[in-house]
Amino acid sequence: MKIIIDGKNITNNQLTQWKKTRVKKVFKTLGYKSAEINNPDSMIEQLTNIKMNYSYQEMYNKLKLKLKLSEIIMGMCAALSGNRRKFSRTEIHLDGITAAEAIESIDNLMLNPSEENTRVNLSACPDHYALRPLGENELEVIETTGNSPVPVQFFIVFDDETRLQTPRDPSYTYQSVGVARMKNGTVIGGVRHQIKDTEKGMQIKLSVEFPALTPTSIIKSHQMHLACEFSYWLQWIKDQK
């Protein structure tokens, strides 16, 4: 697997260091003390077990005050940004899996509720608190984006491209595309993840759109968030073959 951000290869050590920082934050957010984090993947597994013991409503209630704060901040940020956007982009190459296999399984993880999918989605990134399918094409997400001080709640409606600014690249055969809205319907961005086959496997071009007033540090850290979650999802999909 090769991960590329801003034209540079991301090493396993770089991703590990990012995970260590985020794992510590999430333990603190959930009210748990963490030991010295030598193996972040093992600690993420511990976090997943903790999260799986919460019902959706229990997790929401635990984060409710932080989500209310982020809702106010995101609403102001979206209103003041207008149609202007910032973009968080990451690219991943993986051998041994086709683009069709990747998009089919990603769609399944995002839209089909099951205990297995919930565990995989919570394991993909320490900053995931809930990824809950709603109906046929909507996903509720509660996560920390980038290095934001508080988690945020938003709803992605897939196959809706309203106000998206990331262009469709015709050289990529498949895409996972959608608009992100707050609970009150305010558009705060969206995603356009595009996938194509390569000689030995597949390549995915990930793009998340944020309001233009989003701090650049959040945009940069969210590139690593994308690297973390999609590298996990893609490797998991490959391992299921």
Image (cartoon, rainbow, N blue to C red):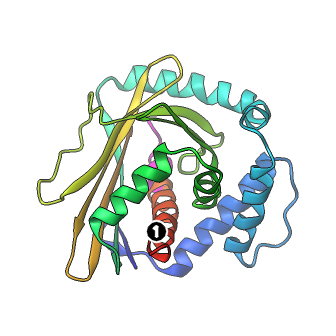
Count up the numbered dots: 1
Instruction: Tell me which corner region of the image, top left, top right, bottom left or bottom right, holds residue 117.
Output: bottom right
Mark 1: amino acid:
Ile
Q: Say whether residue 238 is left or right of residue 19.
A: left
Can residue 217 be seen?
A: no
Q: Residue at x 40, y 79 (%)?
A: 1
Q: Is 39 in front, or is 170?
A: 170
- Residue 238, given in percent of the width and then of the height, sits at 44, 74
Q: Residue at x 42, y 55 (%)?
A: 106
Can residue 89 be seen?
A: yes
| The furthest residue to the left | 170
Magenta segment: 212-220
- Residue 71, given in percent of the width and then of the height, sits at 58, 25
Instruction: Tell me which corner region of the image, top left, top right, bottom left or bottom right, holds residue 206.
Output: bottom left
- Residue 119, given in percent of the width and then of the height, sits at 65, 56
Residue bearing the label numbered 1: 237
Instruction: Tell me which corner region of the image, top left, top right, bottom left or bottom right, holds residue 72.
Output: top right
| The furthest residue to the top | 184
Above or below residue 117? Residue 157 is above
Q: Residue at x 40, y 22 (%)?
A: 80
Q: Residue at x 80, y 47 (%)?
A: 30
Q: Say whether residue 162 is left or right of residue 80.
A: left
- Residue 126, given in percent of the width and then of the height, sits at 65, 58
Q: Quadrant where the C terminus lies? A: bottom left
Q: Secondary structure at mark 1?
A: helix
Q: Is residue 233 magenta?
A: no
Q: Is 77 in front, or is 93?
A: 93
Above or below residue 33? Residue 40 is below
Within-10-Å neighbours for mark 1: few <14, some 14–19, many 20+: some
